[in-house]
Image: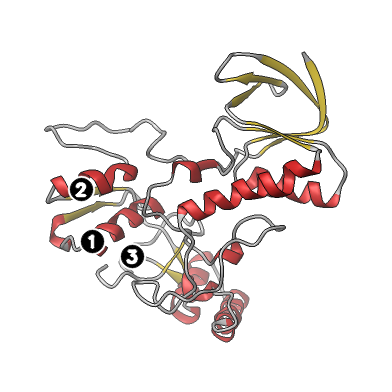
Amino acid sequence: MTTTTDYLIKGCGLMGLGFADTLARETDAHITLVDERAAPGGHWNDAYSFVTLHQPAPLYGVASSPLGDEVIDPQGCNAGLMRLPSGGEVAVHFRRVLQERLLPTGRVRFLPLHRLEHDVEVVSLLTGARERIVPKKALVDATLLQPAIPLRHSRSFTVEGGAACVPPQALPDQAPGFRHFVIIGGGKTGLDSLSWLLDQGVAPAQLWWVVPRDAWWSNRRAVQTSATHRAGTLSMMRRAAEVMAGAASVQDFCEGLERDAGTLMRLSRDVWPTMYHAASRVRHQTL
């Protein structure tokens, strides 16, 4: 069976949905979304229970539908800043975009639990049925920036001595059975896991954190979009622009953003970070 579509989009996460959302609003194109997961939202469907968005909600999601609100957190390490939507809220946001914005146009087709092969061959992961879908305008691969998450990738190390090695999704259920924890990974997921354990009252002496490479972190205080924080955010942006204008090198630029603008952070001033994935944090009081 062969059918046609204007745009064949591989992946129905943030990138794929965001592109489809703009196409649906600004053109009369026919769009086909293909995803191996059972629901839109990409890796948010596999999120651990304690995950939150790392930035204010207005900076995420698709253009046609606002995500979250401007409620200020009253407590915790995010106190005084805009509330961070939970992983469940983000997943629901994407499902509502598909169900309430895209499918009702009659020009969007969604094929969940399907794999795209050879750029035009769409295969059902349930039945094995095949359909050839020819894009008349473009094939769009929205999975190129898809993050690798512990729940789905294969470990690149071995575990010995009978140690339990679990993804963050299993931590709330299994953590009560242990008194010592080793968190592997210096990105957002590793820091989320470490922060969650500290928030549950686990003592720092019970935690070991393996960080293969340090990261630069965006200071969440510099990306607040509510009216309450607007003056402070604009001030930090102005200082960041001044640093950029005067920087003589990448190192000078990064150090200036950390020292003068306050928009970048790192774990230790004794270690030069070698990655920046634009994740934002505020300092945990125990770190």
The residue tagged 1 is 200
The residue tagged 2 is 175
**Residue 1 at x, y = what percent?**
77, 13
Distance in Å between CA atoms under marks 3 and 2: 25 Å
Q: Earlier in the sequence, mark 2 or mark 1?
A: 2
Residue furthest to the right in view is 28
Label 3 environment density (alpha carbons within 10 Å; few <14, some 14–19, many ≥20): some
Residue 174 located left or right of residue 217: left
Q: Earlier in the sequence, mark 3 or mark 2?
A: 2
Q: Is residue 96 above or below residue 237?
A: above
Specify the quadrant of the image occupied by residue 3.
Answer: top right
Q: Earlier in the sequence, mark 3 or mark 1?
A: 1
Q: Is residue 274 above or below residue 30?
A: below
Residue 108 located left or right of residue 46: right
For image coordinates 57% across by 43% down, the residue present is 145
Dots 2, 1 in contact, CB < 8 A: yes
Element marked by disc 2: helix
Q: Nearer the viewer, residue 186 or 124?
A: 124
Q: Give amino acid for label 2.
A: Ala
**Residue 221 at x, y = what percent?**
48, 75
Q: Is residue 270 above or below residue 46?
A: below
Label 1 environment density (alpha carbons within 10 Å; few <14, some 14–19, many ≥20): few
Q: Nearer the viewer, residue 17 or 88?
A: 88
Q: How is the image coloured?
A: secondary structure
